[in-house]
Image: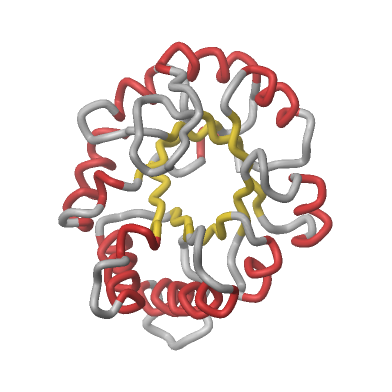
């Protein structure tokens, strides 16, 4: 996919945000449904602590939700116009019939992930500084994530904030689709796109009223 065609909103479903729910799987599925209803077309499932069984169960339910949301009038079997990305686990990406895997600097390397998922699925990689962007530019990956752009509470030990200048630097170093992540909200998302990002990854600012939040993000991003 060309950078210009990459979805502007990259919604991340982090299971850590649902630990207080009485029925977390149902809450996660409902959250995904609302995001899709709001226009999101790119979702990442992120579960840093769950077992392989739990991850696969959640992931298969997300796939079902996506297919049901976009099922055509003529019957089942139509592909959903949404991409599902698995965080970290290339093996479970395949098992859940996801569309790609996202790996971090301390996860499976992109070349190793490519050996597992093959040539057709997406691979994204997190980067946090110019050196990592330069290295990732040489790999067979479909997009680069860069950040944290702003301060974020989604990680216990986040990398140093790169600011909008870090996004501009990354843009100069890669021609691949560039996803900015870290502390991005409806209030600051446009500045991130203007700095050179093709897409913004969001967790926290989608949690409350996710359908309306996704709609507002998309209005501001396009």
**Does residue 5 appear left or right of residue 203 in this picture?**
right
Q: Foreground: 158 or 121?
A: 158
The outermost residue toward the front is 157
The percent coordinates of residue 204 (x first, y second) are 28, 46
Visual colour scheme: secondary structure
**Does residue 141 appear left or right of residue 32 in this picture?**
right
Give me the residue at 30% from left, 78% from top.
Answer: 26
The outermost residue toward the bottom is 75
- Residue 130 higher or lower than 85, as above or below: above
**Quarter location, residue 62:** bottom left
The percent coordinates of residue 125 (x first, y second) are 63, 40
- Residue 147 higher or lower than 212, as above or below: above
Give me the residue at 37% from left, 19% from top.
Answer: 194
The percent coordinates of residue 120 (x first, y second) are 73, 58
Give me the residue at 32% from left, 20% from top.
Answer: 191
Q: Foreground: 128 or 2?
A: 128
The percent coordinates of residue 131 (x first, y second) are 69, 19
- Residue 54 higher or lower than 83, as above or below: below
Q: Foreground: 31 or 222?
A: 31
- If the image is split into quadrants, where does the C terminus sit? top left
Counting the numbered discs, the total is 0
Give me the residue at 26% from left, 26% from top.
Answer: 188
**Quarter location, residue 143:** top right
**Quarter location, residue 199:** top left
- If the image is split into quadrants, where does the N terminus sit? top right
- Residue 35 higher or lower than 146, as above or below: below
**Does residue 111 appear left or right of residue 193 in this picture?**
right
**Does residue 182 appear left or right of residue 222 in this picture?**
right
């Amino acid at each position: 996919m060309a950078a210009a065609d990459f979805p502007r909103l990259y919604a991340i479903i982090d299971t850590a945000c649902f630990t207080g729910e009485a029925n977390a799987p149902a809450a996660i599925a409902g959250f995904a449904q609302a995001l899709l209803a709001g226009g999101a077309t790119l979702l990442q499932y992120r579960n840093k602590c769950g077992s392989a069984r739990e991850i696969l169960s959640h992931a298969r339910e997300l796939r079902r939700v996506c297919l049901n949301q976009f099922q055509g009038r003529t019957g089942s079997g139509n592909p959903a116009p949404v991409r599902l990305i698995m965080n970290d686990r290339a093996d479970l990406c395949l098992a859940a019939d996801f569309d790609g895997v996202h790996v971090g600097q301390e996860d499976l390397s992109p070349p190793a992930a490519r050996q597992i998922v093959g040539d057709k699925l997406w691979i994204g990689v997190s980067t946090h500084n110019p050196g990592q962007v330069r290295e990732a530019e040489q790999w067979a990956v479909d997009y680069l994530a860069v950040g944290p752009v702003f301060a974020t509470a989604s990680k216990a030990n986040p990398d140093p904030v790169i600011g909008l200048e870090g996004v501009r630097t990354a843009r100069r170093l890669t021609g691949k689709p560039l996803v900015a992540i870290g502390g991005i909200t409806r209030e600051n998302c446009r500045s991130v796109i203007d700095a050179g990002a093709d897409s913004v990854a969001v967790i926290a600012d989608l949690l409350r009223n996710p359908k309306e939040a996704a709609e507002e993000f998309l209005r501001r991003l396009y």
